[in-house]
Image: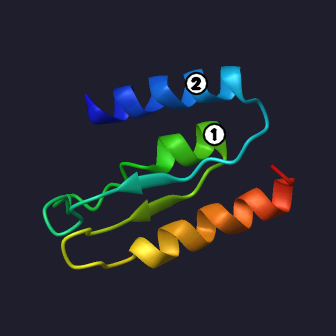
Amino acid sequence: DTLDSMRRTAHTFHSVQPGRPIVFAFNKIDLSRRPDGADIGAALIDEFAGPVVRTNAATGEAVRSLFRQLGQRVVDVGA
């Protein structure tokens, strides 16, 4: 359900702001490890060409990386 919601939101964003960068954040990475090793963000990366960053807001893990990547993408496209 979450991935479907993210996909719909990304489509809406791109329809309103075409060409703007997008970065997908998967929070609570300590709780979301899939035992089969499947990459749940791969379809979003393929569809929207936006990176997926796995974060943990409680510990701060990868939060800076998330904002750095989004900031760099904004600079790259001049948005």
Look at mark 2 in the image and give the residue it sits on. Answer: 11
Rendering coords of residue 71 (x, y %): 66, 65
Rendering coords of residue 72 (x, y %): 71, 68
Q: Is residue 48 left or right of residue 18?
A: left
Look at mark 1 in the image and give the residue it sits on. Answer: 48
Label 1: few (<14), some or many (≥20) within 10 Å? some
The amino acid type of the residue labelled 1 equals: Phe
Q: Please, what secondary structure does the residue beneath circle 1 have? A: helix
Q: Please, what secondary structure does the residue beneath circle 2 have? A: helix
Q: Residue at x 18, y 71 (%)?
A: 58
Pick whichever, 66 or 38, lies toward us: 66
Q: Residue at x 59, y 73 (%)?
A: 68
Label 2: few (<14), some or many (≥20) within 10 Å? some
Q: Is residue 29 left or right of residue 75?
A: left
| Cα–Cα span, label 2 and label 1 | 9 Å
Q: For residue 33, what is the image quadrant?
A: bottom left
The amino acid type of the residue labelled 2 equals: His
